[in-house]
Image (tube, helix red, strand yellow):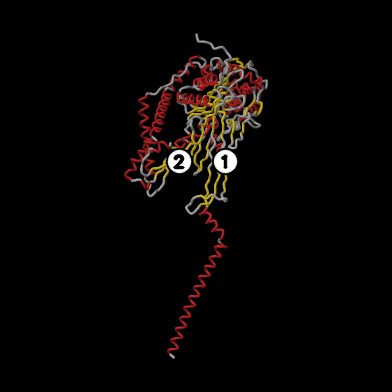
Amino acid sequence: MKEWSKKNTKNKNSNNRANVVIAIIFLLVGSIIYRLYSLQLVKNDYYITLASGQHEVYSELKPKRGKIFIIEDSEGANAKELYPIATNKDFALLYAMPNNIKKEEAHFIAESLYEKFNKGRVEARAESAAAESLVREHSKLNAAKTVLAEIENNPEKESANMPIEPFRPDPEMVELRKKILVEQDKAKIVGEYLKVITKENDPYEPIARKLEEEKVKELDIQGIDYKLESLRYYPEGNMSSHILGFVGYSGEEQKGRYGIEGFFNEELSGTAGSIKTERDARGEPIVTDKREFKEQVNGSDVILTINRSIQFTACSKLKEHVLKHGSDGGSVIIINPQDGSIIAMCSYPDFDPNNYDEVKNMKVFNNPAIFSQYEPGSVFKPLTMAGSIDQGKVTPATTYKDDGAIMIKGWPKPIKNSDYESFGAHGVVDMNTVLELSLNTGAIFSMERMGSKTFSKYIKDFGFGEKTGIELEGEAGGDIRNITGDKIKEIFAATASFGQGITVTPLQMANSYAVLANGGILMQPFLVKEIIHSDGKRDITEPKQIRRVISERTSALISGMLINVVERGHAKRAQVKGYYVAGKTGTAQVASSGGGYGKDTIHTFIGYAPSNEPRFVMLTKIDHPKDARFAESTAVPLFGEIAEFVLRYYKVPTEREIEEKK
């Protein structure tokens, strides 16, 4: 019995084990079935996508950024050469692998990198900065002496037009300051290198971009290497920097900023393409029918109206005169009055778009020719006079009695002529003399004859109070609100008649004089001559007339009056032998932040030549000169030097006999 019981118990245990095994098998089979169900139905899309990622290759095809060109056309409109001022180039990106660099060698490596890639540029920049600082200091030290000399001499006398001798700094002083600047920059740069190459457990750190491959190839330093990348390159350096802007980084993406690069970023950038195909177990692409390809579209090329030789001359002369007078800056604009095309445009201080990241003051990126808003001063008087002549209210021969100063209703102080303290009243004078002597009272007389509302309309018709629409980022529109609307205060209209109390941009002023020069038409100024797309399509800019502002007769009369200013007035140094030059000076006070006007001035001259069919209108502007009181000593001679080059460059036939000095 006991034997049977033991045998029965043994059978039960065997059955239990069998049941457990069967249960386990069922569970395994069930889980496999569920897994297959999940893979085939529930997560089918997920695993297909995952497998595709392991077997597919996706590559973005980057487009080439379009180039920017300027022209050379000395032999006439049908013989133009193109010069690239913005293009693309393969540069070396230098990078460090800090985890492969020994700490004891870090300082030596940082010094070596400085010597190889920074020393030359740092020394050149320091030498230029040292020389410029000495020139500016010289101008400031001699400012009081020069001002006293000008006060003692009547502005009409020839002595006021004597050229200012250029100051040449002592080479030893330049070298001394250069050494100080070099040491400061070197310490900063070496410190930045050390910060990068001593990072612990770091496999990759970019050190410097835009390096020449040939120079980088010579390096043989453990933990330092390079790779090539295509970047923007500006062959002309600083020249045209304000027109161009630059291409910088927005994250990992290159993007145009400021100037043409910013305004036409979309057109210049093009559209990225892509290629998607499968790869084998080794990761190599397989040529199959499933390959997907989208071709990239390269960026469009932009051809500017800027003339290379004239631009170079204008920019070089501007820098020379800004430094000579210890000025804060300046601008030159040269425009074709017949069609509105910009021949040259530059401002100083400028920058090198190749090294935009080295600029310390970001305000330098703004283009003063279109961004700077200032009270223009007496260069505004011809526009006031043109409106009054056009209305038939005055002629060049119309006279009035000048008392040297005038009281305006509602204003407690008299408005005086600039020469009132030294000369007093001029008595009975005509409108020709008003412009020749630049009399504020005469500008007010001319404005009052046509009325403030009519005056306001002409000012708006000349293009003030709104942007010109030039193809550049960052354009300002000026401010003439105090002479618009139903009720214009007499004092605002009076001061605006001679360019005070309103603000304009240099481009607006240059374009308004183009109206005087071309027979009375306001043209749309433009910088882009043509855009050539990657498919060969060409978008050509056609000159655009905005409106007629004054009659041809008024234009001719004003031009004659402005020739008189250059021949007999304060602008004799704008003369070019063999030609009649029309133009007007402006010495404008700078408004103080607390109200009123300070001692700083802005000097402007705007002129055009030749008189019969002007080839160009040019604005020259010098900001806050330290050694001269009036524009006749700064902006006028700058105009004269550039104008002579432009007329000779275009081979413009002379229109008068060249008088030889006896």
In front here: 288 or 509?
Answer: 288
Q: Which amino acid does label 2 sit on?
A: Leu
Q: Can residue 475 be seen in this view?
A: no
Which sits in the foreground, 660 or 479? Answer: 660
Figure disc tally: 2
Q: In this view, does 605 lie to the left or right of 100?
A: right
Circle on res. 593:
none
Q: Looking at the picture, how far across and down is residue 134, in whole percent?
A: 40, 26
State the residue lying farthest toward the top: 662
Give the residue furthest to the bottom: 1
Q: Mark 2 points at which residue?
A: 228
Residue 550 in view of the camera: yes
Position in image of residue 335 (x %, y %): 57, 25
The residue to which callout 1 is attached is: 297
Dot placed on the residue nearer the N-terminal end, 1 or 2: 2
Within 10 Å of the Cα at label 1, are there few (<14), some (14-19), or many (20+) other Cα atoms?
some
> For the residue carrying disc 2, how many other residues have a C-alpha within 10 Å: few (<14), some (14-19), or many (20+)?
some
Residue 240, above or below 161: below
Q: What element carries label 1?
A: loop
Q: Callout 2: helix, strand or loop?
A: strand
Asked if disc 1 and disc 2 are in contact, CB closer than 8 Å, the reply is no
Residue at 54% in and 68% down: 33
Q: Quadrant of the N terminus?
A: bottom left
Q: As shown in the figure, which amino acid type bears the numbered disc 1?
A: Val
Image position, residue 71 (x, y; %): 55, 27
Q: Farthest residue in the right direction?
A: 392
Vertical order, 245 against 458 (above or below): below
Rendered view: 637 above or below 86: above
Q: How far apart are marks 1 and 2 (CA)?
A: 22 Å
x and y, in percent, of residue 620 in the image: 53, 24
